[in-house]
Amino acid sequence: MSDAAVMESEIRIVKDATCTFCGCVCDDMELTVEGKTITKAKNACVLGKAWFLNHHIEEHAVATIEGKPATLEEGVERAAQILANARYPIVYGLSDTTCEAQRVAVSIADWIGACVDTTTSVCHGPSGMAFQGVGEVTCTLGEVKNRADLVIFWGGNPAESHPRHWTRYSLMPKGQFVPEGRKGRTAVLVDVRKSKSAAAADIFWQIKPRKDFEVLWALRALVKGVDIDPAIEQETGISLAQMQDLVQRMKSCKFGIIFFGMGLSMTRGKHMNVEAALSLARDLNDYTRFYAKPVRGHGNVTGADNVVSWQTGYPFGVSLGRGYPRFNPGEFTTSDTLARGEADAAMIIASDPAGNFSQPAREHLKRIPYIALDPHESETTRGATVHFCTATYGINVPGTVYRMDDVPIPLRPAFDSPFPSDETVLRAIEKRVREVLRERQTN
């Protein structure tokens, strides 16, 4: 039997593998690998199982140029020429790849004077702005597991979006100072509708849509001893008695936390809503230990924020066109630069803006040359001038990702891929871009 046949038939167990489907980045997976297929994913939630078990490597050219198969070198050359010749290029995505690849992408953006942006700009971008405005009282998920006796979920549905958040980090697990687990915790859910998460909450508030800021500001007032008009119920859907009860619970708990989702950050008020939540957590520290954290979606979107921040000083929507970083959401964020027709070239990394941006932005993206790096076919890759089929991070590629609480986690891949990693492709593009720019300077 050949070595390849033996490789295909052997069964291996990969312990402590990391699931990169969502921001929980659970690193206790036990994967059963048969050849080039994952057949079992022990400890994974329903979303994680779909992520691992549906991963199959398909036959595909490593690169395509205008839809036609090409070699990696040909794709790199065309991509480098597009980026080096652009006057207003953009680099976007980054949330589903390793931190090592993200660093190279930011470096390319710096060389060509691009706007670098992540998917944060269309989800928790307002949260990033709020952190800059009022700061963040923060903690790790490990501290929540071991200490929290009051857990508030605001504007999210973790039962469906982050199933293991409850079972591994926040509600169910027994912790050092919460030995009874779920029995030792009070769970509060605040949302505009009764989602599947409501059944697991001890207290459920169904507030009126677009009234998050009013409710949070009223809670802040009550924490500070300010009287509130009972008519607040007509405005928000939550009675004064309910608010007073929750404030008392928050002030008397030993360790409390607010986990907020896009239901808070992407509704009316946006960053002001998040600032109110962060300020409420800060105010409560006069009485107890209280924290606030965003619940992040993509596997390494938190890593993207960290990498772009430590290299430019800002988390997303950064222009490097003048040779130094400038931050201005709405001006330099990708959905806006495309919608206004300003960008003349783009590099999209592990993202699908053609499938979820506004119609004006999608139409302009079709009009400009752009490069797409993605393991899977999507609306974005189908329209790309150059598409690189890359290996999947976490399953085929090692590296580093950040959990939603800013804790870095190493990746332990299950098996190799015939395709290159995002980092490999980006390093080749960066090298060629620098050569093209150097040649231009000498001529």
Image (spheres, rainbow, N blue to C red):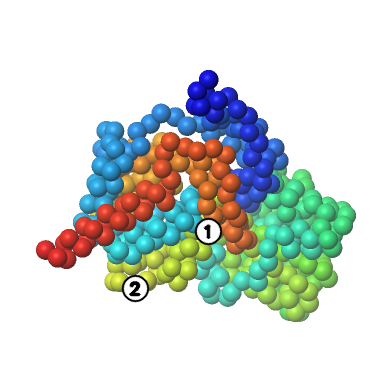
Check if mark 1's residue and mark 2's residue have beta carbons within 8 Å. Answer: no
Residue 209 sits in which quadrant? bottom right
Residue 106 sits in which quadrant? bottom left
Q: Position of residue 175 (x, y in %)?
A: 82, 58
- For disc 2, the neighbor class at 10 Å (few under 14, some 14 to 19, many from 20) is few
Residue placed furthest toward the left: 443
Q: Position of residue 104 (x, y in %)?
A: 40, 58
The amino acid at mark 2 is Tyr
**Which residue occupies the foreground of this view, 179 or 78?**
78
Residue 58 sits in which quadrant? top left
Residue displayed at 43% across by 36% down: 418
Decide if residue 155 is in sight here: yes
**Which residue occupies the foreground of this view, 81 or 167?**
81
- For disc 1, the neighbor class at 10 Å (few under 14, some 14 to 19, many from 20) is many
- Which quadrant is home to the C terminus? bottom left
Q: Is residue 433 above or below residue 50?
A: below
Q: Secondary structure at mark 1?
A: helix
Q: Position of residue 83 (x, y in %)?
A: 26, 55
Residue displayed at 56% across by 43% down: 413
**Which residue occupies the foreground of this view, 261 or 272?**
261
Residue for badge 2: 324
Q: Is residue 216 above or below residue 68?
A: below
Q: Which mark is residue 303?
A: 1
Residue displayed at 49% across by 52% down: 98
Residue displayed at 25% across by 42% down: 74
**Which residue occupies the foreground of this view, 204 or 313?**
313
Q: Is residue 119 left or right of residue 363?
A: right
Q: Secondary structure at mark 2?
A: loop
